Image: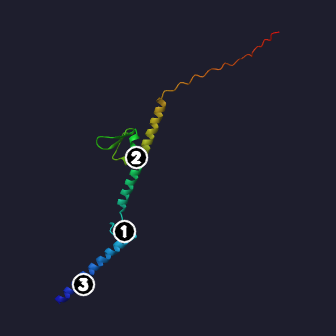
Amino acid sequence: RQLSLSIVHSFVVLFHSRVRAKGRQRKAAMDREWGSKPGSGGAASSQNEAIDRRERLRRLALETIDLAKDPYFMRNHLGSYECKLCLTLHNNEGNYLAHTQGKRHQTNLAKRAAREAKEAPALPQPNKRKVNIRKTGKLFFLSL
């Protein structure tokens, strides 16, 4: 009886190890079906894909928009970024770039442009020569 129990036990252990191996094979095959190669670590999770997408978009935005030329962009001593126009704090460049596209920043830009247009000194009109219009005709004298 002792012998039969050990045989059953070894059979159960062997069965479970084969089931686990088949499960691993199925998982590897499933990963290959969804676009990853064997040994590549599997498909990226949605969270990793979102992080990669944000980083790619941030790099693209920094290439197209030069923050060195932005008159309202300022980095403070704490390592965060400020918008001098709106007096807002931002943790990173991407957050600042999103702010520049937002409603608050755009309305502040419009207000500043209107104020500068109002305060700009009116340029004097250039002096135009005044043309005198004759109200009487020319008199011609004929000498005889």
Q: Label 1's element?
A: loop
Label 2 Cα neighbours within 10 Å, binned few <14 / some 14-19 / many ≥20 = some
The quadrant holding residue 77 is top left
Residue topped by disc 3: 11
Percent x, y for residue 112? 44, 35
The residue drawn where x is 38% and y is 48% is: 94
Q: What's under tag 3, amino acid-wise?
A: Phe
Pick the quarter of the image with the N terminus: bottom left
Q: Nearer the viewer, residue 131 or 8?
A: 131
Say the numbered circle drawn on residue 25. none
- Element under disc 3: helix
Where disc 2 sits, the SS reads helix
Q: Residue at image x 36%, y 68%?
A: 37
Looking at the rendering, in which quadrant would you find the C terminus? top right
Cα distance, mark 1 to mark 3?
Answer: 34 Å
On screen, 19 above or below 40?
Answer: below
The residue where tag 1 is placed is 37
Tag 2 near tag 1, CB within 8 Å: no
Query: Mark 2 highlights which residue?
Result: 97
Disc with the residue nearer the chain's start (1 vs 3):
3
- Label 1 amino acid? Lys
Q: Is 70 in front, or is 135? A: 70
Residue pictured at 47% horizontal, 35% vertical: 113
Residue 74 versus residue 25 in the image, above or below? above
